[in-house]
Amino acid sequence: MATSAPAFGVPPTVRELLCGAAPYGDSAHRDLRAYLGFVFPNLLVDDVRALHANVGGSWAMVEFLRGLWTATSRMVDKRREVTRVDCRAFQASLLCAWTELGRLLDARPAHDIELDWSYGHEDPLDNLRDRLTVLLSMLGDYRAQRVLRELLWRYARHAKASEGMLELYSAAFGCGLEEGAASCRTFPGTHLLDVTGPWREAGEACIEEAALLARGRIRETVQQAIADRKTQPSLREMMATARAKKEAPEPELAAAPEVPEGPGLVILASVSHLPGAARDGDVKVTANVASTPRGEYAPFAGKRWPLVSVGDLAAAREILMSEFPYAEDIIDAVLRDLVGRPYVHVRPVLLVGPPGSGKTRLARRLAEVLGLGCQVYGCAGVADSTFLSTSRQWSTGRASVPLQLLKRLGLASGLIVLDELDKAGTGTTNGSLLDGLLPLLTDDARRFFDTYVESAVDLSGVSYIATANDVTALRRSHPALCDRFRIFTMPAPRREDLPVLLRGVVAEIRAGRGLDAYWMPDLDGEEAALIEEHFQKGGSVRLVRRLVEAVVAGREALAIRN
């Protein structure tokens, strides 16, 4: 450890730390003290009012920075050797500061942060949080190491070639290859972990191997092009062939191929009324043409797109009942309507229940088991009618959400989950989502007029499942909308349903992390019993998920220590 390093200097940037640089003074507390003194010089003279102005008028942030400055000063100002107890106390202070700073900064809108990044403006407080993440990772905190992977990718996406782009991408790739596992390698002469070093080496080896493969393919492509060039006919031979084709009689046109049997719909009849040159059904459109409504929907127009056929309903019921045994009435009501139908279409359903009862999860699983592509649309706070499309005369024009879903799926069937419908805005200044949904829930969906493509489109293959905590106000303000839904009360999971619920929650977490059952097995008896102690009758699915995540986090902590 460089104890002779000056108390104040220019510390390395977060990008340099991620690229492999050691902290200033070869210690976390010296690096953090140098950074605070460099970025917030008012801390040196304890000028509280000037510091208050520099942090945007937040007294909470002023007290936070002063507390962090005090913690680093205690470590640097000690006249005796820093003990292990001092280091552990300082690490605990850093962890608390990291958590509190994240809480304060996350209260800002996400688009403000992304806008600053896109224009290259780094906020000192965001930079401080990133530095704390790196320093805690070097001190061995597994929670910070889990966040470090996302931090690497964020810096890599915004890096230039001269700003360590190769090192950042290599470390990010290597972290994925190593599944986020940190090695025990330390910086020379220190006790700090070199977390990104092994990741960077593994990523560089992977990138180098991929570059060799790409170079070989480019060489083969060039050699094949040269060989093809040599086999091409001469100009005289090409002219003779063209003359012979011109003089030969035209062959009879072959009959158009038959459309395969099966249920299907023509979603959009034509785009010929829109300005542009793209033809209906033309899939070979250039980038400039595809940026217009006509070019964007030309491959979709005039074609018969397939509907999802009804599969084995008994097997679907068995799968859903194994995951939601407490929602038997809802499952049976939905599947009963599909008996004898040629294709899957769920009549509008509104699931009402308290927060965390699993309404959205059940809606998604219904779509997945029935083979429908799913789009969850959050209605909370929506105060306009952009769900129904926006005219192309505006620069932000876009098609309706159902039409976008069908184009993305390449099918005429899909399911939209209208999440938290009761929290949608009731104003009509910019249109109303609640009023606009009415034609989509009836037979009028067969001829819904989309203002973006300026034509009627057939959205009758789209199914809708809405969720709400309470429909009392919705019945009073929009009774016509409630009449178009079949309203079911979502029951809460019972204690006897907990084993089934635990398997489903663990499977979702496993799928979200891209793992299999070998790396994340189901909960054992002791873990399930621990969760059951905190589970009351009528418990929340969201509570169960938090408990399972806590148990999984405990597993990971024990695995790192072992």
Image: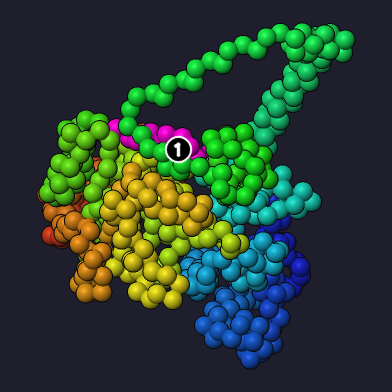
Is 560 displayed left or right of 504 in the figure?
right
User: At numbered mark 1, what does the secondary structure look like: helix, strand or loop?
Assistant: loop
Instruction: Please tell me whether residue 341 is drawn above or below residue 463 in the rendered image.
Output: above
Q: 228 or 89, which is in the foreground?
A: 228
Q: Residue at position x 52%, y 72% from top?
A: 108
Colour mode of the rendering = rainbow
Quarter holding the N terminus is bottom right
Bin the neighbour count of mark 1 within 10 Å (Cα to Cα): few under 14, some 14-19, many 20 and up: some
Indicate yes or no whether the magenta region holds residue 390: no
The magenta span reads 299-309
Q: Residue 555 at x, y = what percent?
A: 36, 47
Kind of residue at badge 1: Gly
Q: Residue at position x 46%, y 35% from top?
A: 303
Instruction: Please tell me whether residue 39 is drawn above or below residue 368 in the rendered image.
Output: below
Q: 441 or 532, which is in the foreground?
A: 441
Quarter holding the C terminus is top left
Task: State whether residue 513 appears in this view.
Answer: no
List the residue tagged with mark 1.
410
Instruction: Please tell me whether residue 538 is drawn above or below residue 474 in the rendered image.
Output: above
Q: Quadrant of residue 478?
A: bottom left
Q: Residue at position x 29%, y 68% from top?
A: 422
Task: State whether residue 295 appears in this view.
Answer: yes
Is 56 displayed left or right of 107 in the figure?
right
Q: Main secondary structure of the magenta part?
A: loop
Q: 116 or 470, which is in the foreground?
A: 470
Indicate yes or no whether the magenta region holds residue 300: yes
Q: Residue 334 at x, y = what percent?
A: 19, 45
Q: Residue 552 at x, y = what percent?
A: 35, 49
Farthest residue, direction bottom: 49
Q: 256 or 181, which is in the foreground?
A: 256
Is 380 displayed left or right of 65 in the figure?
left
